[in-house]
Image (cartoon, rainbow, N blue to C red):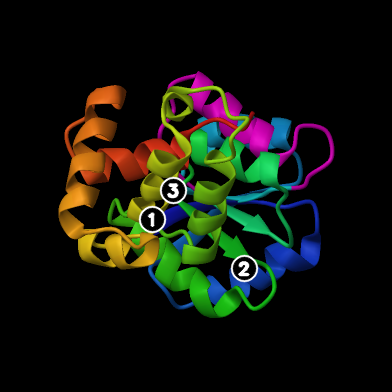
Amino acid sequence: MIPVLVADDHGFIRAGVEAVLRGTRFSIVAATASGEETLDAIKTHDPAIVLLDINMPGMNGVQTLEALRARGDMRAVVLLTAEINDRQLLSVMRAGVEGIVSKDGGEDALIDVLEKVHAGQKAIEPAFLQRAVDLSLRPNVQGPLSKLNPRERKITALVARGMRNRDIGTELGIGEGTVKVYLHTIYQKLGIDNRTELALLAVNEQDG
């Protein structure tokens, strides 16, 4: 069985998660109701995956994730959330959250998310990724991407969305060759080598 810790201050949510996991290869080894309690329980029970409510009394889910990473613990963390604001989203992306599950209908996706993160994959809905990219590309962000001019930032945003050079050219009304020239300039400015690194930079860029 794969040990899972569930951190949520609402008992019915914890009970719901337990019901969803019943009969699967995931087993709840601990249930907590605060960030402080969660950090202690992780040390005690050593779960493979932490299911973490983003809004808890005292230390919230974002702060708990950041504290976990600060002590060098990189185990898989999946956020449970009814809603997440922009700053929270960027914070958990920077902290390396592996998955995000919405409490609204999330029971259908929970097992799939747990399977993916246990396999070392990210399980974050495209809508969350896109929102993080859009936020990170705001003009007031002061970071590596602030070196780019508006056209370069637009191309970066389209690359982060997974668009090919031809499609980017069509979107911007320029040739595919021109897109390649822009990308070469962007790579030089940012000190990177490929579009994957560029997309990761876009997602991980800090909120201004």
Indicate whether 94 appears above or below 19: above
Q: Nearer the viewer, mark 2 or mark 3?
A: 3
Q: Which residue is mark 3?
A: 154
Q: Position of residue 84 (x, y in %)?
A: 70, 53
Q: Residue furthest right?
A: 57
Q: Quarter holding the C terminus? A: top right
> Disc 2 marks which amino acid?
Val
Say which element carries label 1.
helix
In the image, is 183 to the left or to the right of 70?
left
> Disc 1 marks which amino acid?
Leu
Q: Residue 184 sits in which quadrant? A: top left
Residue 15 seen from this side: yes
First in sequence: mark 2 vs mark 3? 2
First in sequence: mark 1 vs mark 2? 2
Tell me, for residue 14, which label it has, or none.
none
Magenta-colored stretch includes residue 69: yes
Q: Nearer the viewer, residue 75 or 169?
A: 169
Q: Which residue is mark 1?
A: 158
User: What stretch of residues is rendered in magenta?
Assistant: 55-77
Q: Position of residue 179 (x, y in %)?
A: 24, 50
Indicate whether 149 appears above or below 159: above
Q: Which residue is mark 2?
A: 17
Q: Quarter holding the N terminus? A: bottom left
Residue shown at the point (43%, 62%) measured from the top left: 114
Q: Nearer the viewer, residue 152 or 65?
A: 152
Q: Are marks 3 and 1 in contact (CB under 8 Å)?
A: yes
Residue shown at the point (56%, 22%) measured from the top left: 142
Say which element carries label 2.
helix
> Disc 3 marks which amino acid?
Lys
- Tell me the distance, in whole angstroms, between the alpha carbons under discs 3 and 1: 6 Å
